[in-house]
Image (spheres, rainbow, N blue to C red):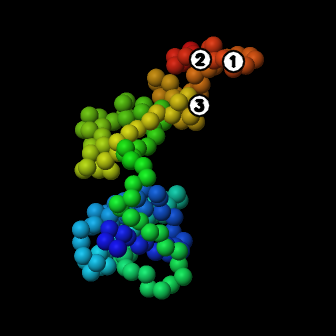
Amino acid sequence: MKGEVTIRIVKIFIPITILEVIAALLMFLDSEGESEGERERETIDIWLTTADQQHLLTKQGSVVFEDNNGSNLPIIQVDPTVHFQTMEGFGAAITGSSAYLINHKMDNDQRDTLMKNLFTDEGINMSFIRHTIGASDFSVDESGNPESYTYNDINTDTDYELNQFTVEKEH
């Protein structure tokens, strides 16, 4: 059926991020107007980053999208004509420590480069960023020193009604 894409799930023991999967799907769905023969030959590059930093955006090779060859592997049917929800964009979180480093340790050129790499099509083109609220392990004070806080700091008892709630840090 035109507009329908079949993706075969292959068991690979390489951890990949959801962003890599989404990027691959978006690149594939972008070829919607291509003929079946062109689509069959399309390849997607695989890049790997591991937590132990043995691989940092290391190219792993390519995969070729092809018709089901009769294997018993699970199949995901993606029909780009069926819409369930609207995607507003993608983003990430930033800690107080990261914000401090960006504002106080980077020069203007480094900061501009970072913003372009994060928020433009020259980079990963994020749409949103959120700051962790309160109790991040990576919170810092105005001098960059570690500091933990919440937005409802109290010395004793409980405050279920949030009468002590404030966005100001206690000093």
Residue 114 visible at all:
no
Q: Nearer the viewer, mark 3 or mark 1?
A: 1
3 to 120, vertically: above or below: below
56 to 126, vertically: above or below: below
Residue plotted at (33% across, 50% down): 124
Q: Secondary structure at mark 1?
A: loop
124 to 111, vertically: above or below: below
Q: Secondary structure at mark 3?
A: loop
Give the alpha-carbon distance from disc 2 to disc 3, as whole Å.
14 Å
Residue plotted at (37% across, 79% down): 66
Residue 33 visible at all:
yes
Considering only order in the chain, which callout, 3 or 2, is on the residue closer to the N terminus? 3
Crowding near the residue tagged with mark 2, few <14, some 14–19, many ≥20 C-alpha atoms within 10 Å: few
Considering only order in the chain, which callout, 1 or 3, is on the residue closer to the N terminus? 3
- Give residue 58's quadrant in the image: bottom left
Q: Nearer the viewer, mark 2 or mark 3?
A: 2
Q: Which labelled disc corresponds to residue 165?
A: 2
Residue plotted at (27% across, 45% down): 120
Q: Amino acid at mark 3?
A: Ala
Q: Amino acid at mark 1?
A: Asp
Which residue is under mark 3?
135
Which residue is under mark 1?
159
- Give residue 91's quadrant in the image: top left
